[in-house]
Amino acid sequence: MSASGYVDLRSDTVTRPTAAMRRAMADAEVGDDLFGDDPTVIQLQEQTAALTGKQAALYLPTGTLCNQIAMHAFTRSGHAVVCEESAHVGTHELISSAMLSGITFRTIAGSRGLVTAAQVAAALEPVPYDVAVVDLVTVENTHQIGGGTVMPVTAMTEIAAACAGRGVPLYLDGARIFNACAVTGADVSQYATQAAALMFCLSKGLGAPIGSMLAGDAGFIEEAGRLKILLGAGWRQAGIMAAAGLIALAEGPKRLAEDHATARRLAEGIAEILPAHIDLDAVQTNIVFVDVAGAGLPLAAWEASLAGEGVLVTIVAGKIRMLTHADVTASDIGAALDAWRRVTAAFGVPSPARAP
Ligand SMILES: Cc1ncc(COP(=O)(O)O)c(C=O)c1O
């Protein structure tokens, strides 16, 4: 349960820094990151490069900024990026991408967010008389709107081959790549090696209060560093945050399987209450979507009523979204399921759990 007294399932970004993180932040050795001499930031960037097998890495405030800088570096204004139709880059970041890079998206309909190499190859097929030029393919792993679904390394390898066949670079939005690794058992470098560049968030399941990492070859990261300053993200004594990031990187991946188990318990509990409204096969990591749109009440009513019962959720892609994270305990899941039971009963939605 969060400090606010709610079971906060709105996102895996809501975790509070651990005591160890707060101590490390207080004691962090810092410099001025705009001058490139913050030793704690340098350490975090070097560790990320080593972990991903890339030549270099850059510490940035958000995953969105990582994606935006990467897409700007790989594309030209007026050109396109191929992505899955509900990918973060092509939905939440559609306007930023248009504003900052003048790019558009060629989208592929995935299955629970996941695309195949054949679909990517088809999207890269030249179209006669078409003026669109594709500069980049992106994949998202885990796929958020898809339900936190996992792309295996083999699928990514095939997609990389399809991209290489057309000479188009592949970028990985790996905001939650460590969640994927916790399921597949793969090392993050096995995914990273398939992509020209990738990003992951320290601020999500890994538990850091802020920050995301962009990794790629040295020339790309040098250009990304220039764009970071151009966009106003030269964040000075960022080592204070990077100190927490180092702990997140070292400790965070180890406990993600717990979040996945908690999400599974939550999803299976919801399936008992509202079996027609949940896709259990999509629950592969720490994300649970409940599709109550057809139950006859506005989504905002579910959100407000669950909050009234002490459980915070969000509405994403027309569904109720919940994420598990380090600050969610087994008893929180019990409390969340009790809240769902009470709200479902109050709304008069048929539930087999209430059948006589
Ligand atoms: C898949 C994916 N990419 C990128 C982002 C953006 O990360 P941030 O919130 O740090 O900007 C998110 C955030 O939820 C995400 O889910």
Image (tube, rainbow, N blue to C red):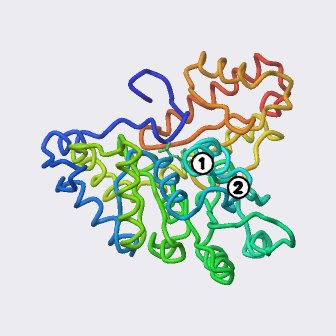
User: What secondary structure is marked by label 1?
Assistant: helix
Image point 53% across, 42% down: which residue? 324
Residue 356 seen in render: no
Residue 319, picture quadrant: top right
Q: Is residue 215 left or right of residue 129?
A: left
Distance in Å between CA atoms under marks 2 and 1: 9 Å
Q: Which mark is residue 105?
A: 2
Q: Give whichever of discs 2 and 1 has the lower sequence position.
A: 1
Disc 2 to disc 1: CB gap under 8 Å: yes
Disc 2 element: strand
Q: Amino acid at mark 1?
A: Ser
Q: Is residue 233 above or below residue 181?
A: above
The answer as to whether callout 2 falls within 8 Å of ligand 1 is no
| Amino acid beneath label 2 | Phe
Tell me the quadrant of the picture where the C terminus can be found.
Answer: top right
**Residue 283 visible at all:** yes
Q: Is residue 50 left or right of residue 39?
A: right
Above or below, 67 relative to 315: below
Which residue is depicted at the point 75% across and 57% down?
Answer: 107
Tag 1 residue? 97
Q: Position of residue 191 (x, y in %)?
A: 52, 72
Query: Residue 340 appears at what percent x and percent y?
Result: 67, 27
Picture coordinates of residue 32 (x, y %)? Answer: 18, 47
Number of residues whose C-alpha sits closer than 10 Å to that of mark 2, classed few (under 14), some (14–19) or many (20 or more)? many
Q: Is residue 123 left or right of residue 50?
A: right
